[in-house]
Image: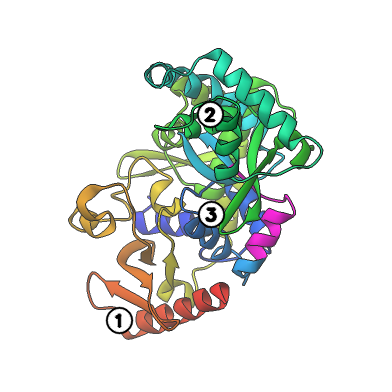
Amino acid sequence: MTSRADLLRLRRLAHAIDGDREATPADVARRMLAVQAQDFAAGSWALGVRTGGATRADVLADLDAGRIVRSWPMRGTLHFVPPEDLRWMLGVTTGRMIAGLAARHKQLELDTPDFARARDLVTDALAGGGRIGRAELTELWEAHGIATAGQRGYHLIYYLAQTGLICWGPTLRTQQALVLLDEWAPAARQLDPDEAWGEFLLRYLRGHGPATVKDFVWWTKGTVAGAKTARAVLGDRITALEVDGVEYLLTAELADRAAGLAESRREREAVQLLPAFDEYLLGYQRRDLVLDDEYFQRIVPGGNGVFQPIVVARGRIVGTWRRGKSDAVDIEPFAPLSAAQQQAADRAAAAYRRYAG
């Protein structure tokens, strides 16, 4: 019988927040497949915390080199993704996402000619290695008679990213510049539809497992039929376990690795300081495994959708934290930490300060 504690240990290993870390931020992106990045700073730390000591400068260097890109591969949410994987991901998700926006496009009076004109202007402006910031792009469209107010500009950018024309690439000021995807990330994997579903599930489980089919369908905004296809494609590359009568899927590789790796004392006492919107919490439909309902308001004050950075111990969320003044890291646990946990939290805070420089 697998316990909840066993399940959460497997998840921490899959997430690379316990056990072996990845060497670079780009390696983290490949492991996780997609890392939430609607908050650029938080997403950057999500990549950094899963490495063996990468700094924020290392994350930005991987973005500037095109080893990581940022786009909307699913759920209408910005994610950091490996450039070679973005196109096949969009091939799975774009049709449903665009169809779901038809009513909103009608409200904004955006139709096919608007998208076509916007596409032509972007292509001309960026061809040959060009890059442009969001403000500069909206100015370009406005100058050519395309209105961008009232979220029209956002939806134009989103549509062109969803359809594979552009992505967020190199850093620009405190964010990123838009570039042509085919120029910035010319290498792309070619997968047929069934292979793409299988790859989606495999990569999700590699960086998030164990997880349920419902978790996967929620994460991808996909379909149960797609998940069934994925399981059939993967065969014995994935396995299953049961916790409290619920089936969870995981890669056979993770199951074997965990079976041969005894939990160390340092792992038992480890405390992680994860960013806001981290995949460890938001990468699943069901979140009560890691967070008690009574503390949800502490993570999302006022229920406004803005998630706070989280403190994790033994796989459970035990508090929040924030970057304070004078290089301080202020930790606010839900209940007092043990002496060993406090020491581990201090080490995690020091790791964050090294990352942030």
Percent of width and height locating residue 223: 46, 23
Name, please, the residue furthest toward the left.
294
Q: Quadrant of residue 247?
A: top left
Q: Amino acid at mark 3?
A: Ala
Amino acid of disc 2: Leu
Q: CA distance from mark 2 to mark 3?
A: 36 Å
- Helix, strand or loop at label 3? It is helix
Task: Kindly identify the residue that appears in the image at 61 percent across and 65 percent down.
Answer: 51
Q: Is residue 317 within the magenta segment? A: no
Other residues around mark 3 within 10 Å, as few (<14) / some (14–19) / many (≥20) = many
Of pointers 2 and 3, the one earlier in the residue sequence: 3
Q: Decide if residue 327 is in sight here.
A: yes
Q: Which mark is residue 156?
A: 2
Q: Nearer the viewer, mark 2 or mark 3?
A: 2
Please give the range of residues in magenta: 58-70
Q: Do the residues under discs 2 and 3 have CB atoms within 8 angstroms?
A: no
Left or right: 312, with 78 as reference point:
left
Most extreme residue toward the right is 128
Left or right placement of residue 338 versus residue 229 in this view: left
Q: Residue at x 38, y 52 (%)?
A: 281
Instruction: Write down the residue under mark 3.
Output: 14
Q: Is residue 224 above or below residue 33?
A: above
Q: Which mark is residue 338?
A: 1
Q: Residue at x 28, y 57 (%)?
A: 299
Tally the numbered discs.
Answer: 3
Give the crowd class for mark 1: few <14, some 14-19, many >=20 residues within 10 Å.
few
Q: Nearer the viewer, residue 156 or 164?
A: 156
Sequence-wise, the earlier of marks 2 and 1 is 2
Circle 2: element type: helix
Q: Residue 1's spot in the image, x, y percent?
A: 37, 50
- Which amino acid type corresponds to the residue marked 1 in the rendered image? Ser
Using the image, tell me which numbered label, if any, was put on residue 74.
none
